[in-house]
Image: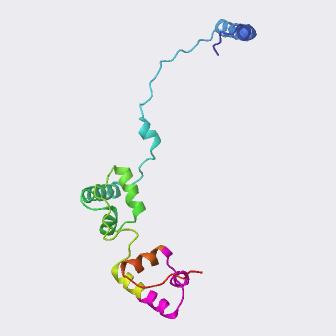
Amino acid sequence: MISNELSLIQQNETLRASLASAVEEFLAGGGQIDVRQITASKGVSVIERIQTPNFQSSSAKSESDAQARRISELAKTLNREEICEREGLSLGVLRGIAKRYGIQFLAGPKKAYAPNKRKPKEDAELIEKIKDCMARGITRYQACKELEISSTLIRRIIADHNIDYPVVTR
């Protein structure tokens, strides 16, 4: 240990003296101090040290590489869901392959409807159920509970389709 603190230097002086005398005795007894050449490490990169080794056989590795090339080509024009469907993969597996091979998906998700909208067929079924609830004389809140839908959805459907469903006031 290298220290500029005088008390530590003085404290370790006895240890240094005993080690120096042990070295002198070793050399006086015919011993030799072996001085070795400094060798450099084999130069393993940080990435190789961090990443787990690849234990795939060469045929499996070539199949994985081919699949990654296909996915890379598909990623230019298709979104992730379409690639999963075409390749028969789950989204998690696809994301893992994309991370390992550095694939970026350029095409965004393609949705036919806004996330908070329902399909017209589902809306038509829901309209019939809402009209049935209205005919039975139950409130909007009770209809929401019975149909297991949100109050926002029932208000949107009533407004979009001009349904005369009165609000019960107390």
> Where does the C terminus fall, quadrant-wise?
bottom right
Q: Is residue 150 magenta?
A: yes
Residue 99 is situated, as x and y percent measured from the top left of the image, at: 38, 51
Would residue 83 be found to the left or right of residue 138 on screen?
left
Q: Nearer the viewer, residue 141 or 67?
A: 141
Q: Which residues are magenta?
A: 128-151
Is residue 60 or residue 116 the one in the foreground?
A: 116
Q: Quadrant of the N terminus?
A: top right
What x and y, as percent, mark residue 20?
68, 8
Could you say where residue 149 lies in the image, as x and y percent from the top left? 49, 78
Q: How is the image coloured?
A: rainbow
Up the image or down, 27 lies above or below 169; here it is above
| Residue 126, image x, y percentages | 42, 84
52 within the magenta span:
no
Placement of 59 over or under 120, stated as above or below: above
* SS assignment for the magenta stretch, majority: helix
Which quadrant of the figure has residue 83?
bottom left
Q: Nearer the viewer, residue 134 or 83?
A: 134
Question: Which sits in the foreground, 55 or 161?
Answer: 161
The residue sitting at 58% across, 13% down in the picture is: 33
Q: How many marks?
A: 0
Residue projecting furthest to the front: 170
The single residue placed furthest to the bottom in the displayed view is 136
* Quarter of image, res 9: top right
